[in-house]
Each structure stands twice: as C-alpha cells, then as structure tokens.
Image (cartoon, coloured by chain):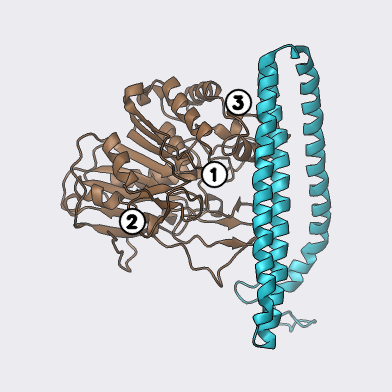
Chain colours: A brown, B cyan
Amino acid sequence: MVVSVNSQIVQLGSYKVQRGQSSVSGLSSGAFMTVQLHLAHSASFSGVGIIAGGPFRCAETYRRAAAVAEDANIENSLYICMNPLVPQTTPNAQRLAELAHETAKSGQIDAISNLADDRVYIFTGSKDNVVYSDVVARTRQFYELLGVKRTSIAYHDTVPAGHSIITDNPEDSYLPTNQPPYINNGGFMQSHDILNHIYSDLKPPAEQLSGKLLRFDQTEFFGNEERASMSRFGYAYVPRAVEEGAPARVHIVVHGCKQGYNYVEYVNGRADISNSPPYGNRYITTTGYNEIADSNNIIVLYPQAQGTDNGTIQNPDGCWDWWGYTSLNPKQPDYYSRDAIQIKAIYGMLSRLGG
Amino acid sequence: MSIYPPTQPQPEPAKPGIPDLQSVAAQVAPAALGHVLKTHAMLNRSIARTLNNGMFTAGLATHFMDPQIWQELLQLQSAVVQRLQQQNEAWLKGCAILLQDYVQIKDANTMSKLVEKQYNLVAQWNQLLGSQATNLMGLEENIEVDYGYWASQKLNV
C-alpha cells in the first residue's frame, strides 16, 4: 500500500506521546545510527530494530589502522565493521561493551542500565556482502554483554537476503540482491516483524490508512549546518486517532545509505543530477511501517540524511554518521554521543513529538 | 559604496551553481601541491602500516609452534584468494559485456550515433579499469588493516 504526501511543508507538532516507550529501527548506516541513538538516549527507548548494523563505536576498534584518528575510523568502518576478511577480524564486542560503559560514565550517553528491559531485533541476510553477517553477530554479543536478556533479543541470520530491508512488494528487488535501493522482496514485511517484536501487544496492520504523512522542515533541528549532511525535509506519519488526541508511541525509522528522499547517484565523483532523478520517498511509503503504525497509534518519524562530497564532508552516499564525518574535532569525534549533531537533531524531533 | 568608477573592468559575477573560473583558477596551484602532499602522506601511511605489521609478524614468530595461529593465518590467506577470485569474475564479466558492445558498434545508423557508441565504449572501458583499480587498492588496504588488527589481538598490544 502506498501513501502519498501533499505539497504542504508543516512544522513538526506535539502529540500525547508516552515517554520512554519510543523505539527506533534502521538499515545499514541507519542500523549503526540506531545503535548510537539507542545508547545515547536509552532512557527514551524501549526497543530497537537493527538490520545489517554493527556495534556501538565500531569504527574505533583498531586505532593503529592510521596515524590520524579520522582516517583510522574510516578504515575501521570499511575493513572491520563492514567487510572483515575473517571472523577473527570483526569488531571485539567485549572491548566495545567496555567502551560503552566508559562513555556512559563520562556522561556522553545515558546510563547503560536502561537497556536491561529493552527489546532488540537484529537481522542479517545470509547473502549480505555489504555488511557481513560476522559483524552483525557481534552486535548481538554486544547487547548481551550490556545486560539485555537473551530472551529479549530476536536474532535472524538464516534468510537468504542481500543487504536490504525486506518487503512483500512485487516491485522490489530479488531477495539476494545487494544493490540500491536496498529494498528487497522476501514475501514478508520486515517492518512488521520489528515492531511486533518491540511491542508485543500490536494489532494487525491497517488495510486502509487513516492518518497523514507530513513533510516537515527538519533544518530547524540542526541549525541548517552543512556538516550535519541532513536534507531539508523530514517526514512523519501520524495516525488519525493520534491527531485527535489518543495516547501514542513514536517509532523512528532511519534509512540506510543511498536511501534519503533526495539521494542522487554520484557518477565519477559528481552527483548525476542531469540524468538520475532523486531517489524519492519509497523507503517512507512502501516499507510497511505506516500500515502497522496506523492500527496501533504509533507515530513514525523518518529523519533524512543527504549526500555531500566536498573538501570538508565526504559522504557522497548520504549515510548517517557512524565514523565521525560530522565531528568538529577529527581527533576527538563525537558522532556517537548526545552532542553529535545528527543525534541531537533526531532527538530534538522526538522531543518535539512529545517522546 | 565607492562613487568612483572601478579602474579595471570587473569580472562578470558567476551564475548561481557555476563556479567562478578566476577564483577557482587561483586555487589550482595550492591544490596541485596539496595533491602531491596527500599522495605522499598516503604512501607514508601505507609504509608505516607495513612496518608496523612487519613488527607484529616478528612478534608472532615466537608463537610459531601454536597451531591456532597457523590455522587463522591460513583462513586469512584463503579469504584473500576468495576476494581476488570475486574481482577476477567481475573483470571477466565486464570484459565480456564490452566485447558485446564493440560488436554492436557497426549497427550505428548515423555518424553521430557511431561517435557516441565509440565514446561510450571508451568510457565504459575506463570505468571498468577504474573500478578494478579501486577494488584492488581497497583489498590491499583491507589486508593491511585486518592483518594488523588480527596480529595485534594475538600479541595483546
């Protein structure tokens, strides 16, 4: 089912949201960001969905990779957190769990103890060659080490899927595909599985949507700073009952690289604006989140990142920051903390909604 | 604002979205120097990493009786061979497609179409070469980083 958005640009509003009951899910860079958001603001979340994502501060696994921290982080991201050669060169979950505790102790993220009763959904396709399954296995280990109960973690690694969020849309790519738009048809809606795992009391998805998909100007949440690498617009689906005052929960959906609404393919290092149309809002309208949200009074928030590739910011694929490209001080990147520009912006949106 | 006319003709302001040629040209010389320095820095980084990895290898020599070390080294090697095989497959596939394109050039009906097809073939060839070179360089970095990381764990450093 496809939902359309009218031409209006609105300001993100406030609703009767139950605090501490929000959740977040994402794919790929959105999954890394999901883990960061979860840890940075664990007091606000009750669960997460991670599709093809690695553990917290994974990019800082092996500092000796390069003399400059910024360069080492990029190389860690590529060769340890995405494509490690063997399982022994995947991130060390034990070390990263200790790092998470240290980060919490220094006050940069919420207390780790908040995670104990959270629900965690983790997925890796067995055909994924963008973020290898060995890395995602470390994410499970990482959460267990932080005190999340084994029974609260749903871990899936047997579906023969490529790097993607899975849907049941006939138009979407063949399941083992590892190519943009990274939305593959596997005969089920993964978004429903995620939300059903996080919230155990959900009703079946709506056949007909009752609410509105809103387009809001998200620049107010990051001061329109270029280094945020975020788009002008964000989106939110608000069910009618919530608009009319019913109590609600918020689920944040964090897209992956090359999936923001205004993403344009970079060809030979330049955005191919003359040939390639912007990606559009397929991730927002066809991945099934809105349908299950509608029948369960859940607001779905879709923040948007955009591609930038200049001397200062190297993010041509419009990925969320999980290796430090937005940090003001490259020697001490803060991309994972409550002060990180993207995390601050998304949390600002959640707070505005009332969560 | 000055009331005097400018003594020299002023350059026309650049159109929005199009960089001003004069100001960009002024940045070329420092940028060229920057490229040289960056390449130098990258080479130095690779050399430093190789030296670092060499020291790790020397450290691992004391563990040469440990079968676990040998087993994991073999795993690393076979992972590298597998990646090279994948790159080779992509190369052969790319060449096959280009050959097919080459055969079809003769079907052009107009001179402009002929030039376009020839140009496309050259561009596709360059793209294939570029992606192979990038992937090969990526694999080299991957090996350097992963080997160093693996060895540092074995040596607890």
Quadrant in the picture for residue A153: top left
> What's the chain of the residue with tag 2?
A
Residue B156 can be seen, yes or no: no
> Looking at the rendered structure, which numbered label has been put on residue A169?
2
Identify which residue, A264 or B37, lies in the foreground: A264
Residue B138 can be seen, yes or no: yes
Quadrant in the picture for residue B123: bottom right
* Proximity of marks 1 and 2: CB atoms separated by less than 8 Å: no
Marks 1/2: CA distance?
22 Å
Give the residue drawn at x 30%, y 40%: A193
Left or right of residue A238, residue A133 in this image: right
| Identity, as a three-letter code, of the amino acid under mark 2 | Asn
Point out residue A88 in the picture as x, y percentages from the top left corner: 60, 25
**Is residue A117 depicted above or below A231 in this figure?**
above
Point out residue A175 in the picture as x, y percentages from the top left corner: 42, 49
Mark nearer the N terminus (1 vs 3): 3
| Identity, as a three-letter code, of the amino acid under mark 1 | Val
Crowding at mark 1 (Cα within 10 Å: few <14, some 14-19, many 20+): some
**Is residue B71 depicted above or below B6 in this figure?**
above
Left or right of residue B104, residue A25 in this image: left
Query: Badge 3 is on which residue?
Result: A88
Query: Badge 1 is on which residue?
Result: A130
**Is residue B19 depicted above or below A240 in this figure?**
below
> What's the chain of the residue with tag 1?
A
Crowding at mark 2 (Cα within 10 Å: few <14, some 14-19, many 20+): some
